[in-house]
Amino acid sequence: MAGDGGVCLGSSAKAFKRARIAMATRLPPFSAALLVWSFGAALYLIGFFQRVAPAVITTELMGEFGLTAAALGNLSALYFYTYVAMQIPTGVLVDHFGPRRVLTAGAALACVATLLFSLSSGFGLVATGRLAIGASVAVAFVSMLKLAAHWASPSRFAMLSGLALACGVIGGVTAGVPLRLAVDGFGWRNVMLGVGIATGVLAVFTWWVVRDDPRERGYSGFAEGDSRVRPVHTMLGGIREVLRYPNVWFSFVACGAITGPVLAFGGLWGVPFLVTHYGMSTANAAFVTSVLLVAWAVGGPIVGALSDRLQRRKAPIAVGGIVATILWCVVIWVPGLPYPVLLAVLALIGLASAVIIIGFAFVKESAPATLAGTASGIANMGNMLGGMVMQPVIGRILDASGSGSVDHGVRIYELSAYQAGFGFMLVWLGLGTVAVFFSRETRCRQIA
């Protein structure tokens, strides 16, 4: 009997070992990749919501804290200051410690920062909360790209990058009409308090579910090597290595120039511009700017798939920048566009501007694969730089115009002032588009 038991145990052990070997040589199903990836997408959605929310509560913030346009622009841009500053450190941290730890820490800090923003009575604490929100949610996008590189096939990377943008823009759209309705019903502080609590719940589930690499769940992985083996570069050494590749610099400049107007208009100044010069309600103006963001989201997977199909990175980015520049000129310099035309032009701008998503595949292919997180962080830093600079600069140009009137403590600016402010972002957009032509085509292959 004992012998029979030993035989059975030995057979079971061998069968179990064979099953483990079989699983370890099997790639993870795409459903498992989407599940793990979705936690990064959820934090990115929340981060995009936080990015755009001030555009809808401008009246409340200006009235409650007595803010000028420049002060409001600076408050909104505080998010971008820390978001941009965190991009390179985030890429390095993700490469060294893995996206699971980085995502969990980011969500936990975002929870605390949002609670501070919602409960503070003084401008200083509100500004501190805004700074901390930007720093905390900054980890989401790069972590998503790192998870996609390990859990999904390389042929799906551009598509997942586009879906990542789509998830973010869903958060931006939620910060449009839905946020306005929620604020009207419950007040902006209560709404932001609820967002903070939801972010804390996300932090708990991220730690529970997410793993850095499929090998940690018994599968084989798509990425070369093992995510648990960290890069041999030091943090600064990895940054220096990535910056040796010119495509990283050109993508940094170009994609930031294309993204900046979308974030400046859709994230802050579009709503007051439309309310003042098209006579829209705040809710309707928020809907119009949401069309821009929705088109941006829809365009991400489309242009990503198109770039993969054409096996080109450089040309689609250049074409998108040129089209966006022309259409922004129409919005800014042709006053009184019919409502359907305005919606159509902003939708086309969003679709054209979605080419920035190709930039992440561009830098991934242009820098060493082991430093994909660092390269993605630098690229995303460029994307956010446009919004960080454009929002407050436009506010300063509006204040410097000396035009407009004051209504219930809120200054109303003339069309010429908005045209001057938006003209600044057009110049940047044009220069950034020119930078694309100096880059080297990768043909969708790893060239580093």
Image (spheres, rainbow, N blue to C red):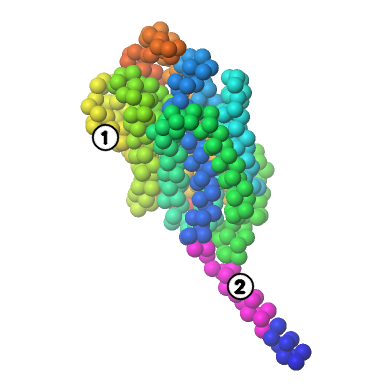
261 sits left or right of 81 in the view: left
Q: Quadrant of the N terminus?
A: bottom right
Q: Is mark 1 on a helix, strand or loop?
A: helix
Task: Give the Cα distance between marks 1 and 2.
Answer: 55 Å
**Residue type marked 2:** Ile
In magenta stretch: residue 25: yes
Q: Which of marks 1 and 2 is in front?
A: 1
Q: What numbered label is drawn on residue 21?
A: 2
Q: Residue furthest right?
A: 2
Magenta segment's dominant SS is helix
Asked which secondary structure carries label 2, the reply is helix
Q: How many numbered circles are shown? A: 2
Residue 376 in the magenta stretch? The answer is: no
- The stretch in magenta equals 10-29
Q: Which amino acid does label 1 sit on?
A: Ala
Q: Residue furthest top?
A: 402
Image x and y of residue 198, in percent: 55, 42
Report the side of 30 relative to 235 (left or right).
Answer: left
From what the image shows, is residue 425 above or below residue 379? Answer: above
Q: Identify which residue is drawn at 46% across, 16% down.
A: 69
Question: Which of the marked residues, 1 or 2, is nearer the chain's N terminus?
Answer: 2
Instruction: Rate crowding at label 1 as few (under 14), some (14 to 19) or many (20 or more) other CA atoms within 10 Å.
Output: some
User: Is any atom of residue 184 visible in this view?
Assistant: yes
Q: Position of residue 298 (x, y in %)?
A: 36, 44
Mark 1, residue position: 344
Residue 291: percent from left, percent from top: 34, 35
